[in-house]
Image (cartoon, rainbow, N blue to C red):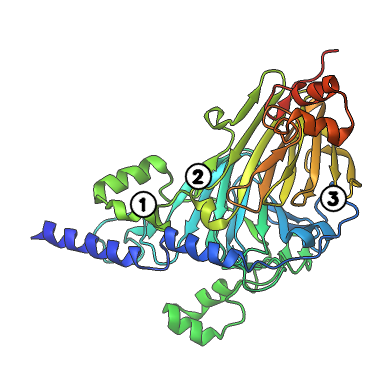
Amino acid sequence: MASNNITLLTLSLCLVVLYSPFSLAQLTEQHSKLRGQQWQHECNIEQLSAAEPTRRLRAEAGVVEVWEPNEEQFRCTGVAAVRHVIEPKGLLLPSFTNAPYVTYVVQGRGVQGVIVPGCPETFESGQVGSRRQEDQQDQHQRVFRVRDGDVIGSPAGMVQWTYNDGDTPLVSVTLLDLSNPHNQLDLNFRSFYLAGNPQESREGKQRGPREIAGKNIFSGFDDELLSDIFKVDAETINSLKGENDQRGSIIRVEHDLEFLTPETEEMELRKMRKIPNCFEETFCSLRFKHNIDEPSDVDVFTRLGGRITTLNGNKFPLLQHLQLSAERGVLNENAMMTPHWNINAHSIMYVTRGTGRIQVARENGRLVFDGRVQEGQLLVIPQDFVVVKKAEQDGLEWVSFKTNDNAMISPLAGRISAIRGMPRDVIMLSYGLSKEDAMRLKYGREELSVFPPNMD
């Protein structure tokens, strides 16, 4: 009888989930319909810059840094960028944002938590069968380990938190797609914290930028009302509102956090509970991370040149909903990436290591960027602007965030380039070349998109 009840329960849950607003297929379809209504922005860019963060908010156990959101290149592409540095034993407090985003873990290891509305608690720990609240088992939603090379996605309005349980700083860079239809507000980046008092810092009261600072969302509500809602005393409500909390948005943890972590335990729980396959089609069991540094994922590899790895909605289904993707690039010393343009997306490039020279040209051939980039800098490359990248002596590595879940590039040189696809006579007439020169221009490069250094 108990077995029949469990079967009926899981079937009911399947029906609820499959017909709820959290079906991935439904959300993706709704998003694609809205995509055509995306805001268009003024992009008459005359000059791009390799930018460093301009705003910095110090917390007890880390730093939050933001690139100036009102710069023309960010307003044009409708994005914002944030870098977090979480010290060992640091906890980035739970929060959500008004826009979907993707995060790349530059270095370090830690634990990430995500709370998906309407989904059941995936993990359980503690004393089974206890009736005392302080001894009863703790149930919580998804928790997974993150490490350097991971790309983590988050829909708008979904709560996430991060804990650094390693021995080195956990550094990540995040790209928020403010012009995404899932952001119904405006082009201002807003973080809604569920705890703490982010506008405070260890150095004392230090008002940070509006985009990353402010009291938590409970701070303005009536104490008595909150006490009735949560059934807790006034002292707990005071802590909930964080009015006297001066630790900022990244707090230091004095003892080891207790929760179930990880994929192996998660899989065991699924086997134990025999969760039906219908949950695979929802956010409740969707993967929220994918490592883009895995050798098996490389799309283009050239000996002595380097490699390019793309992460799109086919490899990482959550990106279909976010309408975002990523590219990981590694160029060896003096290697180059073919001149190309992004067909259907803006590209926001963050340099993770090394240095290089980059040129970017707009439609009239005028260079809007011609300079050197280095680790920690961010460069916006608008849709259809043509970009050339060349590594210097210490190589060049980057991650690019793109505003389409299936972003595509069109190369100008190499085996699959626009030049290679033209008939010889069209090249001759278009450029005023002889037959021999046209053939050299067309077939001079046999590589796909990563070119090794010239050995001449």
Residue drawn at point x = 89 percent, y = 50 percent: 364
Residue mark closest to the camera, 2 vs 3: 3
The type of residue carrying mark 2 is Asn
Q: Which residue is label 2 attached to?
A: 314
Q: Position of residue 244 (x, y in %)?
A: 65, 72
Relative height, residue 265 to residue 229 (above, below): above
Residue 148: tell me if it is visible: no
Seen from the viewer's position, the closer of residues 41 and 164 is: 41
Crowd class of label 3 (few under 14; some 14 to 19; many from 20; radius 10 Å): few
Q: Residue at x 79, y 66 (%)?
A: 206
For residue 78, side relative to residue 113 (left or right): right
Q: CA distance from mark 2 to mark 3?
A: 31 Å
Where is residue 9? Give x, y as percent: 21, 63
The one of 134 and 119 positioned closer to us in this rendering: 119
Q: What separation in Å lies between label 2 and label 1 (alpha carbons)?
A: 15 Å
- Residue 414, image x, y percentages: 72, 28
Q: Is residue 120 visible?
A: yes
Above-or-below relation of 406 to 351: below
- Identified by mark 1, the residue type is Glu
Q: Amino acid at mark 3?
A: Glu
Name the residue beneath numbered marker 3: 363
Mark 2 vs mark 1, foreground winner is 2
Residue 280 — which label?
1
| Dot 1 alpha-carbon crowd within 10 angstroms: few under 14, some 14 to 19, many 20 or more | some
Task: From the viewer's side, name the closer residue of 167 and 400.
Answer: 400
Element type where label 3 sits in the image: loop
Find the distance from the CA under tag 1 to the CA under tag 3: 44 Å
Q: Is residue 225 above or below residue 451?
A: below
The residue at the point 75 percent across, 69 percent down is 210
Q: In which quadrant will I find the C terminus?
A: top right
